[in-house]
Amino acid sequence: MKGMLRPAQTVMPASALEPEADVVSPPPNRFTHVVQARQPFYVGSVLQGETGGTLPAGAKVVLMVRGKGDVCRVIDRRGRYVTTSFKGLRPLS
């Protein structure tokens, strides 16, 4: 069409994709805990050291595994199965 410009195409990097192994499908619709304050989460083990992102304050999660110390595994409403701090969670009543 005359006078119509298309934007340049871009390809997202591979890091923009979530690993399939750490995603639960379908995502949960019932939750056990809420995040008290914004806190980081890790995909896989905390020992790997790479932050997968942050869970916002007020985010509801399902507690799946309570590890030794402060470490736990949760599933958020997007279905991400991640490692985070248990101290930052509060049980839902």
Image (tube, rainbow, N blue to C red):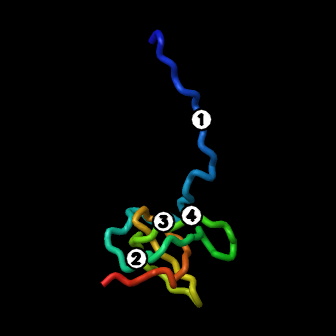
* Residue at screen point 47% across, 12% down: 3
Q: Report helix, strand or loop for mark 1.
A: loop
Instruction: State the image coordinates of residue 15 (x, y, percent, origin top left).
Output: 62, 53
Numbered badge on residue 34: 2
CA separation in Å, label 4 and label 1:
23 Å
Label 4, on which residue? 53
CA separation in Å, label 3 and label 4:
11 Å
Numbered badge on residue 80: 3
* Residue at screen point 69% across, 71% down: 49
Quick one: which residue is furthest to the bottom in this view?
69
The quarter of the image holding the C terminus is: bottom left
Quick one: which residue is furthest to the top in this view?
2
Q: Which is more N-terminal, label 1 or label 3?
A: 1
Q: Which is more N-terminal, label 1 or label 4?
A: 1
Quarter location, residue 85: bottom right
**Disc 3 marks which amino acid?**
Arg
Q: Report helix, strand or loop for mark 3.
A: loop
Neighbourhood count class around disc 1 (C-alpha, 10 Å): few under 14, some 14–19, many 20 upward: few
Q: Which is more N-terminal, label 1 or label 2?
A: 1
CA separation in Å, label 2 and label 3:
15 Å
**Disc 1 marks which amino acid?**
Thr
